[in-house]
Image (cartoon, rainbow, N blue to C red):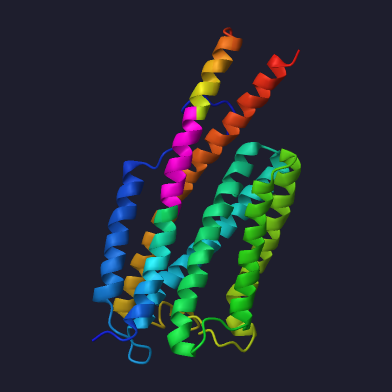
Amino acid sequence: MSRDRSVNPSPTPSIALVGAGLVTTLLALYSALVFAPTDRVQGDVQRLFYLHVPAALTMYLAILLVFIASLRYLQTRDAAWDELATVGAEVGLLWGTIVLLTGAMWAKPIWGAWWTWDARLTSFFILWLIFVAYVMLRSYGGEVEQVARFCAVLSILGFIGMPITHYAVEWFRTMHPGPVIMTEGGLGRGLPGSMLATFALGLAASVALFSNLFVLRLRLEQQTRRTQQIRRHLDLMETP
Amino acid sequence: MMTNPGYLFAGFALAWGLALGYLWFLSRRSAVVQRELEILEERLKQVSPQE
C-alpha cells in the first residue's frame, strides 16, 4: 500500500458497487415488508429481523476487518492499515447503533421493555461502547502513532468481545432468542425458505450498503490525512 | 391488517435515517476537505515549485 498520493487519488464506490447497493436494498425492502410471511407469534414486528440480524452480522464483519487491519498496522506500522481500521470502526459503529435501535423497537412490543440487561444485550452494548471509545479516541487527536496503537489495542478487545456476544445466547440464560440461521440442524434450517431468502437479501443489502459507505469514508480519511500532511510540510517550510 | 406497524416502521425509519444522514455528512465533509486539499496543494506548488 503506497503512501504517495496526488491531489485526487482517493477511492470512490464503483458503479457496480453503487448499483449492487441500490438493487439489493430495494429487493430487501420489498422482501422484508411485503414478500416475507407474517410471523404467527410475533406478528409484523418480526419483520425487523431482516434488518436487525443482517446489521449485527455486518457489524461482526466490520469488527473482523478492524481487527485484521489493526494487527497488520502493529506489524508493519504502515498508516494505510490504520486508515482501514479507522474507517471500519466508524462505519461499524453506525451498524452497531442500528442493531441497538432496531433491537429496542423489536423488544418493546414483544418483551414489553425497550431494553433488558441480559447477557446478549449487555455484551453487545459493551462491544458497542468499545467502538464508541475507539471513535472518540480518534477524534480526540494527540500524537498520531500513539493514538493508532491505542486504537489497535481497543480493536483487539472488540474482537475478543465478538464471540462472547455471539455465543452469549448459548452460554447464559437470556431473553434474547437463540440462533435461527446457524443452528445445530444445519445452516438456515431454523427458518422457512421464504424467510431465509429474505434474510439473505437483507444481508446482501446490508453488506453492499456498508461497502459503499466504507469506500466513501475511506476517501474522506485519505483526503483528511493528506491535508494534515501538507499542513505539516508547509509549516516546516514556512518556519524561519 | 398489520400488527405493531408503528414499531416496525420506526425501526426501519431509524436505520435508514442513520445511514442516509451519515451519507449526507460524508458527502458534505468530503467536499469541504477536497476544496481545502486543492488550496493546500496549490500553496505547496507555489512554495516549492520543484516538487
Q: Is residue A42 above or below residue A3?
A: below
Q: Is residue B28 magenta?
A: yes
Q: Quadrant of the C terminus of chain B?
A: top right
Q: Is residue A146 above or below residue A170?
A: above
Q: Is residue A223 above or below residue A61?
A: above
Foreground residue, B25 or A88? Answer: B25
* A201 lies left or right of A100: left
Q: Is residue A193 magenta?
A: no
Foreground residue, A89 or A1? Answer: A89
Q: State whether residue A180 appears in this view.
A: no
Q: State the extent of the magenta-drawn residues as a range.
A: B22-35
Foreground residue, B33 or A158? Answer: B33
The location of residue A70, given as percent across then percent down, is 66, 49
The location of residue A119, given as percent across then percent down, is 63, 81
Helix, strand or loop: magenta stretch? helix
Q: Quadrant of the N terminus of chain B?
A: bottom left
Query: Tag count in the figure?
Result: 0
Residue at image x 65%, y 19%? A234
The location of residue A195, given as percent across then percent down, is 33, 78
Residue at image x 54%, y 26%? A5
The location of residue A6, given as percent across then percent down, is 51, 23
Residue at image x 42%, y 54%? B21
* A220 lies left or right of A40: right
Residue at the limit of the structure toward the top, as seen here: B50
* A92 lies left or right of A154: left
Q: State whether residue A190 appears in this view.
A: yes
